[in-house]
Image: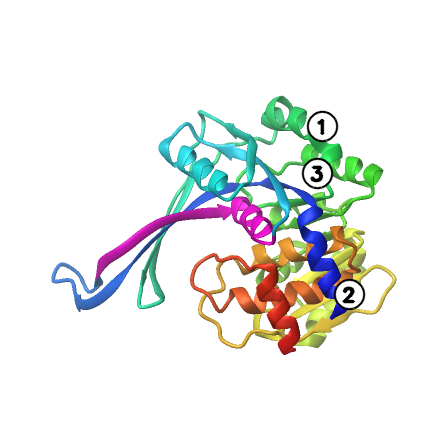
Amino acid sequence: MKKYTSILNEFRNKHVLVVGDLMLDQYIKGSVSRISPEAPVPVVVQEESFFTPGGAANVANNLSSLEAKVTVVGRIGHDHEGATLKEVLDQRKIRTEGIFADKRVHTILKTRIIAHRQQVVRIDREKIVDDSDGAFYCNTVAPFIHKHFNSFDAVIISDYGKGIVQPELLNDVATMAARSGIPVVVDPKVENLKFYGPVTAITPNRKETENALKSLEPETRKAVLIKTTTLDSLDAVKNAGLGLLKYLGIDSLLVTLGEDGMYLFESGKDPFHIPTRAKEVFDVSGAGDTVISVFTLAMAAGAGKREAADLANHAAGIVVGKVGAAAVTPDELIVSLKEN
């Protein structure tokens, strides 16, 4: 407990760079007492509406809630939603000078309608452009990252497959991080799996891990001794994790498993399973953002990967007991640690 308290106290002295796909989340909350006469759907009487950071911006929000300094880098559209997202981040003291407006896109907006603590429907608005030529990164993102990189203690890359994360970005960041001796952790997208080799760790959930396994050729899976693409047991997760670690050539892999906790795989070490800390689950949205935030920040603060994963597991147990893409605080983590 004393070691964990020391790590948590160090959070406020760390500065984390978050790069990735930015989103604005809108929540409309209300109550339902009748079914619409127009269609067999519930009528939600709105009681409140508010905006929160989403996607990579929610990772930044989690870090800010943990009292770390945060700089976020990404793209928004030339629109009201983009301005609203920057305002929301500014209110949370998250540095936004690395956010660039792009006339080709809309700011990604996800609207969730919730009644009686249950999500009724989600509406997404987005426009994705092909940035595979690397021009947007080279002309806007890269100069900012290169200029400020020496001020960061860790990097999180939040890849939702919306175009920001490209090979050039990953190679650049991994090279600079290796030179500086700081961790780079990626929330992965299966389409970009082959890009992630140089990073410190990736943090897929069970479904993302299954999709990653299915994306490999059968001969490739056989070569790294992966026996199944269905992770319906901890033994299957262990086998798959060891195989993916070997295939990707990365330093570590943290697989989040919901009610089964987490499994940490490190190069040259035995796999490490951590049972879940969740007492009650209301909403799993944003739990992955919480995990990657705490895991990365803890490593930046001096924790080993097992300690960092354990802290992240405590954080996940807290955040799934809240409604919406929520965040955790150091005080909440301390309470959870004392209880366990």
Cβ atoms under marks 1 and 2 closer than 8 Å: no
The chosen color scheme is rainbow
Amino acid type at image mark 3: Leu
Secondary structure of residue under mark 1: helix
Residue at 71% across, 28% down: 146
Asked which secondary structure carries label 2, the reply is helix
Q: Which quadrant holds residue 222?
A: bottom right
**Disc 2 residue type?**
Lys
Residue 62 is one of the magenta-drawn residues: yes
Disc 2 versus disc 3: nearer the observer: 2
Q: Give percent across and percent down for residue 175.
A: 79, 36
Can you identify the residue that label 1 sits on?
146
Mark 3, secondary structure of its residue: helix
Which contiguous range is marked in magenta? 44-66
Q: What whole-number distance in Å separates the C-alpha atoms at marks 1 and 2?
A: 34 Å
Front residue of this view, candidates 187 and 80: 80
User: Gap in Å between the C-alphas at discs 2 and 3?
Assistant: 32 Å
Tell which tag, 1 or 2, sits nearer the viewer: 2
Q: Can you give x and y, in whole percent of width and height, for residue 40 in the image?
A: 19, 65
Pointer 2 residue:
3
How much space separates mark 3 and mark 1, taking CA atoms? Answer: 13 Å
* Spot occupied by residue 127 in the image (x, y as percentages of width and height): 43, 36
Q: Earlier in the sequence, mark 2 or mark 3?
A: 2
